[in-house]
Amino acid sequence: MATHFVAMSYGPRLAERFQATLVNYRDWHLQPVHLLVVVDEIIQKLRELNISWYLGGSVASSLYGMQQLAQDIDLVVDLLPQKTASFEASIASLKPHFAFEEQAVHQALLQHTAIALLHMDTAMKVDLIIGKHEMSFLSRDNELCTMELDENHQEVPVASVYEMILFKLYRYHLNELSRQDGMTDDMQWNDILGMLKVQGPALDLSLLEQEVKHLSLEHIWDLVLIDAGLRKG
């Protein structure tokens, strides 16, 4: 049942690794998801290697907007070339608490893409996003937020609300370009609306609009501002 869930949620290859790792467990049963418990061991490895990272994805957008159930946890990792080998060794040491493909990890490090790790106790996927994604030019150190998500854990760096709005806006745009059925990505749209409605009064909209123009997304931006009640139609 758990393997079927992993296959449906994350694909057959990760499900195969999950099934192969599961044989090392006795009396395995699914544990409730606690975000910081899931990523705690990974964060410790990053801190030991003095590698900068921050929390992004749907978890970060949920912190700024409407609460939602995350399907995975995104950690954006700023990996310097000289630390690649030690980082790969640290990932390898995460077994058996995480299921992953070692060859896929190696390729992701070479190509600066995402490493998918499946937490065995909770079947929650953690994506380590290597290098810079489309919107990370906004996440300079002084623009990251630090949040206490749990009193029993250290504060964690989180992508800025500006990065998350632009990232979701760009993802919505890419989905719009790729679809031929006329449907829209309601999840991304609702994430953007949630952040604008909750954070709206504190946002520097002029900063956002500068970056929106840079990305040529003005047509979507106007619509989302109207939908969020921040601009008259």
Image (cartoon, rainbow, N blue to C red):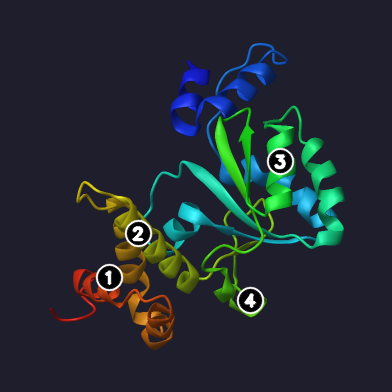
Residue 26 on image: x %, y %: 69, 12
The label shown at residue 140 is: 4
Q: Earlier in the sequence, mark 1 or mark 2?
A: 2
Q: Secondary structure at mark 3?
A: helix
Q: Secondary structure at mark 4?
A: loop
Whether pointer 2 and pointer 3 mark residues with C-beta atoms closer than 8 Å, the reply is: no
The residue lying at 76 percent from left, 36 percent from top is 94
The label shown at residue 220 is: 1
Q: Which class describes the residues within 10 Å of circle 1: few (<14), some (14-19), or many (20+)?
A: some
Residue 50 visible at all = no
Q: Earlier in the sequence, mark 4 or mark 1?
A: 4
Can you identify the residue that label 3 sits on? 105
Please give left or right for residue 61 compared with residue 196 in the image: right
Report which quarter residue 172 is drawn in. bottom left
Say which amino acid is labelled 3.
Answer: Val
Residue 71 visible at all = yes
Q: Earlier in the sequence, mark 2 or mark 3?
A: 3
Say which amino acid is labelled 1.
Answer: Ile
Q: Earlier in the sequence, mark 2 or mark 4?
A: 4
Say which amino acid is labelled 4.
Answer: Arg
Q: Secondary structure at mark 2?
A: helix
